[in-house]
Image (tube, rainbow, N blue to C red):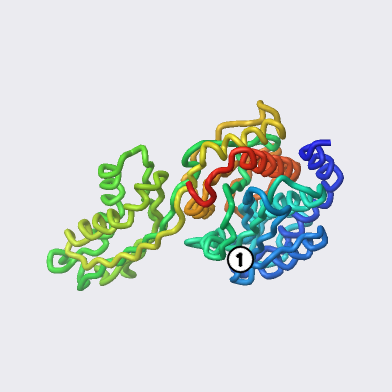
Amino acid sequence: MSAADAVDRWVDTHTDELVATRRHLHAHPELGFAEHETTAYLERQLRRAGLTPQRLPGGTGLVCDIGSGGPVTVLRADIDALPLPDLKDVPYASTRAGLCHACGHDVHTTVLLGVARALAAQGDLPGTVRAVFQPAEEQVPGGALQVLESGALDGATRAFALHCDPSVPVGRVGLRTGSITAACDRLEVTLTGPGGHTARPQLTVDLVHALARVVTEVPGLLGRQVDPRAAMSLVWGAVGAGVAANAIPETGSLRGTVRVLDREVWDAAEGLVRRLVHRVGEDSGATVAVEYVRGVPPVVNDPRGVALLRSAAIETVGGEGVVLSPQSMGGEDFGWFAERLPIALARLGTHGGGDPLDLHRGTFDVDERAIGVGVRLMARTALHSLAADAVAPSRAGTV
C-alpha cells in the first residue's frame, strides 16, 4: 500500500474523530497569543500519537516533527479565533461570549492535526514533516514572526498552508501561482487645528473639510503614483471629528488599511502614504500626525510549491476539482514565512450549498466534508515535497 493510500484509509477510519476535533475547537475559541487551552489540547493529541511537540517561546502554538532526517517540509496551520460573537444555532457553537472561529482556523488546525496523526501512523517517512501550529494569525504583524524567530523554519526547504474558501464548493481546491493574498498595513491619521465657528471658516482651519480631502484625495493620488498592476488600495474604515453642528473641531482622526499585492510596492508603501497624507493635510492648513503600522506581506506562491500542491490536489479531488483561485486583498501572515523559504498557500473549498457563509462573520460555518479533503491534500503535498527534495534537494532557507 502506498503512503497516500494509507493516508486515505486513515482518514476514512478517523472521519468522526476529525469532525469531533473541529467541533471541540470551534466551541472553545481563543484569541491570538492566548490560545493556552487550544495548545494544551493539541499537545495531548499529538503525544497520544507518539509524537513530541514543542511549544513556541510565547507559550502558545506548537512545532512537531513527524519523521526524521532527510529533507524537511513545513506544514502550517493557524490556531487563533476572532473577537466576534458566534451567531450560529448549532451544537458546537462557541461557548465563549464574543469569541468565535469565524475564519476557519479550527478547520486548518484539525487538518494539520489529522496530517500529523496519519503520517505518524505510517512509520518511516522519506524525511521530516514539520507541523507548525501557529498562534495569532489575526493580529498585526502576526504570530508568524514568532515562528521565524523561534528557528522553527531552520533547515526546511519549503512550507505549505491552506485556507478555507467559502466561495468554492467542498471537494474542490483553489490554486494560484504568484500573489494570492495582499499585504495589509494599518493607518491612523490625526489632524489638528485651532477650531472655531462654522460661520467663519476663513479665520481657522476647516478641519472637517481637511479630513474630507485626505479621505478622498490620498487614495486617488495613490492610484496615479503606483503601477495599477500592484493593486494598491487605501480604504478608510473610521472617521471621527466634532460634536456640534456649528463648531469647527480642533482635532479629527481617520483609520484605515493599506493593501497591495506586489511585494516591492509594499516595501515602499509606508513612505509614499506618509508623504501624500502630509501633503494633502498640510495644504489645508492642518497639523498632521500619521501612525503607520506595517502589518503582513503578501503571500506570493512559489511556482514549484504550487506544482507540488497541484499534483497532490489532482490525486485528492481529480483534475476537475482543481480551480484557479482569484487573488484576494485580504491579509495572511503566512507571507512572513517567505522571508526564509519558498511558500505556497492553497484554498480549501468549504461551501456545501445555499448562500456562501463569508469569512469574518459570526454566521460562518463549513461543510465538514472539507476536513478529510484537507488532510488528504496536505499529507500528499508533504509526501510529494519530501520525494522531490530527496531527489533534487533545493537550498534550504532561500527563496
Left or right of 391 in this view: 111? right
User: Residue at position x 86%, y 45% from top?
Assistant: 13
User: Residue at position x 80%, y 39% from top?
Assistant: 8
Q: Locate residue 25, reporting x and y percent.
A: 72, 59
Q: Locate residue 309, reporting x and y percent.
A: 62, 38
The residue tagged 1 is: 31
* Observer able to see residue 373: yes
* Observer able to see residue 332: no
Frontmost residue, 53 versus 333: 53
Frontmost residue, 139 versus 193: 139
User: Residue at position x 46%, y 45% from top?
Assistant: 329
Report the residue that reaches farthest toward the right: 13
Q: What residue type is labelled 1?
A: Leu
Quarter assignment of residue 113: bottom right
Quarter assignment of residue 254: bottom left
Frontmost residue, 95 versus 36: 36
Q: Locate residue 394, reporting x and y percent.
A: 55, 43
Left or right of 119 in this view: 75? left
Q: Look at the image and tell me in which quarter the N terminus lies.
A: top right
**Element type at mark 1:** loop
Frontmost residue, 4 versus 220: 4
